[in-house]
Image (cartoon, grey):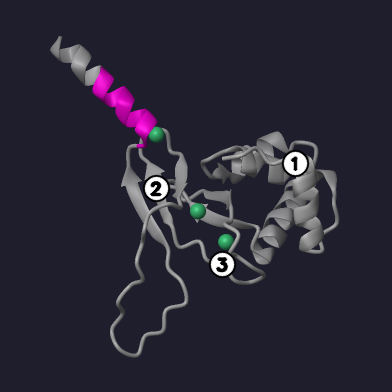
């Protein structure tokens, strides 16, 4: 992922007619810097200069505008990740796989998978879908195989 500059975040807020406030820019740069979703408690920890209500308002405004999307991890904690460019106001297209790592508990947005539409029975009209998977991320599965080979040596 290319590192997004502050002026890009300012432009993003402008495009969504949101005022360019320091907390909003901080939330954006934090979410965009990682390739995994960021949990609400983690955000609260970093954004300790603003209260939880303000943070909550920022997150829900971003979600409404199609800038970020919410995904729950294995503990049921809300995590947030940046949206792809085809999300819009009150309309999300985050139909990618959300991979929950059972070891590090990180939630990965796997955008590059080719997920075909779902064949629904007659009469159902699809609006969107969410896909969750659990398992080990590359980092954690590497650690596991390393430990295993140690045992056998
Ligand atoms: Zn979205
Ligand atoms: Zn992991
Ligand atoms: Zn996602």
Marks 3 and 2: in contact by CB < 8 Å? no
State the extent of the magenta-drawn residues as a range: 137-146
Q: Residue furthest top?
A: 153
Crowding near the residue tagged with mark 3, few <14, some 14–19, many ≥20 C-alpha atoms within 10 Å: many
Instruction: Determine the secondary structure under disc 2.
Output: strand
Q: Residue 124 vs residue 70: left or right?
A: left
**Cα distance between the residues tagged 1 and 2:** 25 Å
Judge: label 3 CB < 8 Å from ligand 1: yes
Q: Which numbered disc, 1 or 3, marks the residue that appears first in the sequence? A: 1
Q: From the viewer's perspective, is residue 43 above or below residue 121? A: above
- The tag on residue 26 is 1
- The tag on residue 99 is 2
Instruction: Determine the secondary structure under disc 1.
Output: helix
Q: Residue furthest left?
A: 152
Crowding near the residue tagged with mark 2, few <14, some 14–19, many ≥20 C-alpha atoms within 10 Å: many
**Quick check: can you spot residue 24?**
no
Residue closer to the observer: 12 or 107:
12
Tag 3 residue: 92
**Cα distance between the residues tagged 2 and 3:** 18 Å
- The tag on residue 55 is none
Give the image quarter of residue 143. Answer: top left
Q: Residue 81 vs residue 96: left or right?
A: right
Q: Would residue 81 be counted in the magenta stretch?
A: no
Residue at point 61%, 41% (across, down): 41
Q: Would residue 141 be counted in the magenta stretch?
A: yes
Instruction: Determine the secondary structure under disc 3.
Output: loop
Q: Residue furthest bottom?
A: 123
**Quick check: can you spot residue 10?**
yes
């Amino acid at each position: 992922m290319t590192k997004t500059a502050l002026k890009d975040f300012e432009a993003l807020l402008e495009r969504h007619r949101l005022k360019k406030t320091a907390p909003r820019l901080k939330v954006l740069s934090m979410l965009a810097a990682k390739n995994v979703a960021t949990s609400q408690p983690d955000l609260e920890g970093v954004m300790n200069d603003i209260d939880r209500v303000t943070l909550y308002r920022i997150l829900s405004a971003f979600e409404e505008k199609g800038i970020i999307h919410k995904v729950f991890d294995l503990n049921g904690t809300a995590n947030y990740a940046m949206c792809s460019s085809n999300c819009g106001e009150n309309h999300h297209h985050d139909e990618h796989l959300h991979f929950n790592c059972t070891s590090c508990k990180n939630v990965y947005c796997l955008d590059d998978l080719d997920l075909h539409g779902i064949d629904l029975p007659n009469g159902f009209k699809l609006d969107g879908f969410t896909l969750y998977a659990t398992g080990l991320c590359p980092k954690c599965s590497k650690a596991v195989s390393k430990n295993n080979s140690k045992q056998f040596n």
